[in-house]
Image: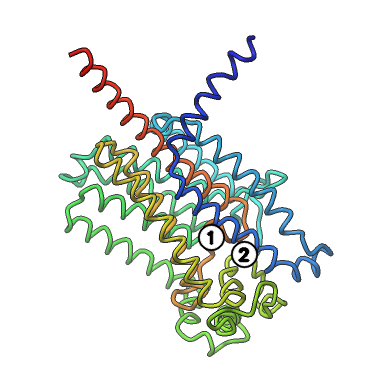
Amino acid sequence: MNLSLAVKPWVLLSRRINAGLDTRLLLVACGLASIGLVMIASASISYAEHVYGDGFYFLKRHLIYLGMAVIAGLVVLQVPVRTWYRYSDLTTVVAILLLVAVLIPGIGREVNGARRWISLGVINLQIAELAKLAMILFMATYLQRHQLEIRTSWQGFFKPMALLAIVVLLLLMQPDFGSAVVICGTTLALLFLAGVRLWIFGVLFASGAALLGVLAVSSPYRMQRLVTFLDPWADQFDSGYQLTQSLIAFGRGEWLGVGLGNSVQKLFYLPEAHTDFVFAIFAEEFGLLGVVVVVALFAVLVLRILAIGRAAVRRQDWFAAYVTFGIAVLLAGQAFINMGVTSGLLPTKGLTLPFVSYGGSSLLVSSMMVALVLRIGVDMDDSMWGRQKQQVNSGSRG
């Protein structure tokens, strides 16, 4: 009897959540994750067999990550949106502490000269991914609390800009220039949406662009990436090797692709093709038609998130609105950058394609973000139903 009483609230909560879920958003996210699972199996099989003696090594690990991502998404789906608002400052502090901890030898794990991960046994947690979500939550909370100050005075910018500077500095020390660019872009987008005066936003945007330019020019490897991006074929066997192999993959795909599993570029031509450049292997195997399908799925994903954000604006729930807009900008920006890098449109950046690239941290945080948006939609649906019920009751009493 006691057990049934304890379980009943969770059953009722699950039914309420299921009734208000945005099924189109959920299905699109699941579709992208499914494409990622198939492509990781295809792109990594030769490399995994050669290095680990098991062609399905990365597929098995990604299945574990996918299971963890589903569990994390379900947990986030149970947490009320107001709880994220209440503890946003705490999540930001924790994220900054972890960004500091990852730089400490013995705690942070170094791979190819970059110290970005903390080993948790089953998964190497990339702290930058958590920092992206933490910054969105912090900015949404700050913009709701200081809407008037943000629009009328410089003082309102000091706290978010100071925090952004700290986060970017810690990311550059790893180094992780790509994540720094994405977080800066998302923060500036939220400030613009919050109603910052155009001339102030222009100064901020110009200052941020100048800073990123200085950082790019001051670092030899970043400058080399820019030069390589402009003409990868000039040094196709050294600095331009990865990009030229990616472009060859796109060219071989033509209209309909060479077929699933028939990629040649994944056979030790394109290094670690299952990670940041998995989209190139997808383009080779499924061609232009497959590329259009994936781009369309990301477009639908972002549009559904924006639709929930617009609904939050109509309710004047500014925290929920800023969170959804921030997540939409971040996912859209990261997908655009990854696709742009693999197709030679943008300089090389170490950014994953959300839900598709191999990487437990990216998959985990992307799932949490989508689950948070779904929860926002559920809470709005509940409040609307509650208002309608109240109106019906008051009408019947009259």
Callout 1: 10 Å neighbours few (<14), some, many (20+)? some
In percent of width and height, residue 258 lies at 63, 80
Instruction: Select label 1 or label 2 by which is in front.
Output: 2
Q: Secondary structure at mark 1?
A: loop
Asked if residue 133 is positioned above or below residue 238 in the image, the reply reads: above
Name the residue at 62% across, 51% down. 360
- Which residue bears the numbered disc 1? 175
Give the residue furthest to the front. 396
Q: Amino acid at mark 2?
A: Thr
Q: CA distance from mark 1 to mark 2?
A: 18 Å
* Left or right position of 333 against 149: right
Total labels: the figure holds 2
Return the residue nearer the eye: 346 or 6: 6
In percent of width and height, residue 344 lies at 48, 78
Callout 2: 10 Å neighbours few (<14), some, many (20+)? some
- Which residue bears the numbered disc 2? 275
Q: Quadrant of the N terminus?
A: top right
* Left or right position of 336 against 385: right
Mark before the other along the chain sequence, 1 or 2: 1
Q: Secondary structure at mark 2?
A: loop
Asked if residue 390 is positioned above or below residue 152 in the image, the reply reads: above
Query: CB under 8 Å between callouts 1 and 2?
Result: no
Name the residue at 44% across, 56% down. 331
Q: Amino acid at mark 1?
A: Pro
Residue 238, picture quadrant = bottom right
Name the residue at 50% across, 38% down. 94
Asked if residue 151 is positioned above or below residue 279 in the image, the reply reads: above
